[in-house]
Amino acid sequence: MTSATTGLGGLTGRYAQALFELAEQEKSLDRIADELSQLAAMIRSSDDLLRLIRSPIIARDDQRRAMEAIIEAMEGSALTRRFVSLVVSKRRLYALPDMIDAYLGLIAARRGQATAEVVSAKPLTKAQAAAVAAALKSAAGMEVALATRVDPAILGGLVVKLGSRMVDSSLSAKLNRLSLAIKGMG
C-alpha cells in the first residue's frame, strides 16, 4: 500500500480524523466505532462485498446503493451513512477498511489502549479473545483492543501484530520453517 493511503497523515488518516471529530461533536464516538467495527467484519467475511469496494469498474451509483442498503440493514447512524456516502462519492471506497482501522485506532488511543491485529484460522471464541487480550495486556503493560480477522491459509495458531512487533505462531509459518530446515540439511 502506498504511503498516501496509510497513517494518520495520509488519506485514510485524514478521513478517520474528520469522522472522529464529527463523532466527538455528536457525542457518538462509541456508536460510530461499533457500527464501523460491524461494517469491517462484514467486509472481511464477504468476498462479494470486498469486490464491491475494491473494484474500479463498478459504477459509483451501484456502490452507493449497495453501501446504503448495508448500513440501513445494520441500522447505522446518520453520521455513518453520510461518511460512507462521502467516501463513495470521492471514489475512495477501496480505502474504507483502512479508514475504519484508523478510526478505531484513534478511539483506542483516546482510551489509552493499544490495538493488536490478531489473525486466526477460525473465528476466536469470546473466551479465546479474552485470553489473547489478557496476555497482550500483560506483555504490553496497557489495555489492548483486538482487531481480529480470519485467514484459513494460516491453518492454525495465531499471527499477532502489536505496534511494530509481530509474533507468527501459525501452523503455516512453522511448516515453512521446517521445510527450509529440511532443504538446508539436504
Image (spheres, helix red, strand yellow):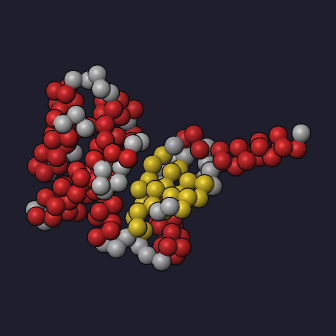
Q: Position of residue 68 (x, y in %)?
A: 17, 37
For image coordinates 37% across by 70% down, the residue present is 113
Q: Quadrant of residue 31?
A: bottom left
Towards the viewer: 44 or 142: 142
Q: Position of residue 39 (x, y in %)?
A: 29, 46
Q: Residue furthest right?
A: 186
Please tell me whether residue 57 is drawn above or below residue 79 in the rendered image.
above
- Can you say which quadrant of the picture contains the N terminus? top left
Disc count in the image?
0
Please tell me whether residue 133 is drawn above or below residue 22 in the rendered image.
below
Q: Position of residue 33 (x, y in %)?
A: 26, 57
For image coordinates 40% across by 67% down, the residue present is 114
Q: Is residue 170 left or right of residue 100?
A: right
Q: Does residue 143 appear in this view?
A: yes
Q: Does residue 100 appear in this view?
A: no
Q: Is residue 60 left or right of residue 100?
A: left
